[in-house]
Amino acid sequence: MTSLLFNPSDYDPRHFDAETRRLLRATIDWFEQRGKRTLVEKYHAKEFHADFLEFAAKENLFATLLTPAADAKGDPDKRWDTARVAALSEILGFYGLSYWYPWQVTILGLGPVWQSANPAARERAAKLLADGGVCAFGLSEKDHGADIYATDMVLTPDGEGGYRATGGKYYIGNGNVAGVVSVFGRIEGVEGPDAYVFFVADSRHENYHLVKNVVPSQIFVSEFRLEDYPVTADDILHTGPAAFDAALNTVNVGKFNLCFGGIGIAEHAFYEAITHAHNRILYGHPVTDFPHVKAQFVDAYARLVGSKLFCDRAVDYFRSANPDDRRYLLFNPVTKMKATTEAEKIIALLTEVVAAKSFEADSYLTVAATDIRGLPKLEGTVAVNLALILKFMPNYLFAPTEYPPVPTRHDAADDEFLFRQGPARGLGKVQFHDWREAYRTFVHVPNVERFALQAEGLAELLMTAPPSAEQQKDLDFLLTLGELFTLVVYGQLILEQAELTGVDPLVLDQIFDTFVRDFSGYAVALHGKPSTTLPQQQWAVGQIRKPVVDAERFAHVWSQVESLSGAYEMRP
Ligand SMILES: Cc1cc2nc3c(=O)[nH]c(=O)nc-3n(C[C@H](O)[C@H](O)[C@H](O)COP(=O)(O)OP(=O)(O)OC[C@H]3O[C@@H](n4cnc5c(N)ncnc54)[C@H](O)[C@@H]3O)c2cc1C
């Protein structure tokens, strides 16, 4: 059986071109040759990942994968191809968030640049990448968190057509080394949204002051200040409402990588956990003989495979997006909040099993257990993304429309639409293809059928006992409703990917076993909310379903899990 999980030992992504395959392989080989001891020692020593940046520069890794075709000066290997960006995100996550993060914030830093029509700024960024440099995204400020409208980075006109920028930024990754720092601010003397501006700064400029690393970590998440920093026309990326759209559209592109980072972390942790537990003998038996341990591993495996299926399918919608097909705007926050919280659950299950091993200085699990909690919180918390997801719910459930089929997108296309997404508003108007189709295709899989009934139940709740005007203002109530809805969307794309790739129906059944239980759990949570009405409470109780039990199916999935013991171990 081919493993459904990424395994560095036999990784061979034949769907990519030769140079992409070479780069991905070279990255894996770099980590493997460096070895696990070095990986974890540097992590615990909080040693900045300068050696990784050197490797990336030498191989042209970021330049090749992050320069759009329009800025590639004819280099046939350079393009922005979400499928290979996702593949590298997974590989880097596999070896640790410390290596995924500088890549991720380079992507974010490039977002406002590749969306800009300023040729000088684009050329500078392309050259910086070609020279092995990295970028940063300067949006957050110490006092304002998610409230990006309230920026205190102020640009004052200098009387000669340029500006002087003064203000601080906080939590800015790569802010210690980036040659292109995309900074969000506002222009002094201009009122409202017209004041917004995105411009480029350089961390090496004398008016750029690095204050500190905000986090105690291998990564550098900077606080910096600009004092009277000169900003010329060549540095201005966007002004007015377009600057705000550029911020949101950049996060749209960037936050898509968080799910793949989380999947990579969970995969590495999985190999380590199953190999440890399966070979540890307690009372004369392997730890994996305990029924609860088997159940935890099977649950973690089902969640991990489910997450991979969803995120891989979401790549296709990302790459096929256009002004008339903005379905990716729903699937993206689902990757962000759902796939990353699933990764957290997987690590929680694995560390529950291995217990002390996940505290040891030489375990990857120790690193994973610490880092995994970052993904659901960064670039928009779970709550922020759920609030976004809810905007799509009415049209998704009740107003399906026809679209041409979206095939698997592994072709070597340049995803240029991502940098001309247009205004970020109008989410409630986006329409979807009929979600019921995917569920109908797999109605023969017992737990898909059972979960589909729960999904129908959600539609029924919204028709018969919808949230009142009061409840529609109560985010605490709505977020639980959002969790129920998210599961329906999550299941749909998993089924689509299962059909495209021919996933083992027994594994699929096990995945939906977890969803039937999760849906029941969220229904109970809704039942307990202070404002839930009697009909809503009755509905919630009616949604508590037991998954279809099948001992043979469980044994079959367990045998897949068991086969992963010893299937991969990082070179010491
Ligand atoms: C390791 C790390 C790296 C980072 N890297 C970068 C970077 O490179 N560049 C950058 O610009 N920023 C970066 N950030 C900042 C990060 O994106 C912040 O977490 C973000 O700005 C939100 O701020 P906050 O976490 O302080 O939460 P707050 O904004 O203070 O939110 C507090 C609470 O309010 C809730 N909330 C806020 N708004 C809403 C809403 N609209 N709907 C529902 N609930 C809401 C949140 O869910 C949260 O629970 C980084 C942060 C960290 C920790």
Image (cartoon, rainbow, N blue to C red):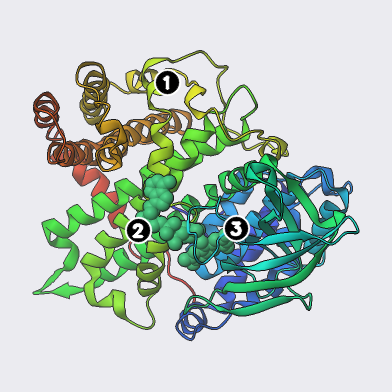
Q: Provide residue 440's location: percent of width, then percent of height.
A: 33, 18
Q: On the rendered structure, is 9 left or right of 4?
A: right
- Residue density around tag 3, few if under 14, some if 14–19, many if 20 or more, within 10 Å: many
Give x and y (percent) for residue 155: 73, 59
Residue 307 image-quadrant placement: top left
- Tell me how far mark 1 sits from mark 3, CA to CA: 31 Å
Q: Which tag is nearer the camera, tag 1 or tag 3? A: 3
Q: Marks 1/2: CA distance? A: 41 Å
Q: Secondary structure at mark 2?
A: loop
Disc 3 C-beta below 8 A from ligand 1: yes
The amino acid type of the residue labelled 2 equals: Leu
Residue 57 percent location from the top left of the image: 74, 69
Q: Earlier in the sequence, mark 1 or mark 2?
A: 1
The picture places residue 428, in percent across and down from the top left corner, at: 47, 26
Residue at 83% in and 54% down: 121
Give the residue number, with chain letter if any, for mark 2: 564
Question: Which residue is the site of mark 3?
Answer: 139
- Relative to 565, say whether 71 is above or below: above
Q: Which residue is mark 1?
A: 395
The reply to whether residue 227 is in sight is yes
User: Sequence order check: which comes first, mark 1 or mark 3?
Assistant: 3
Identify which amino acid the numbered label 3 is placed on. Answer: Leu
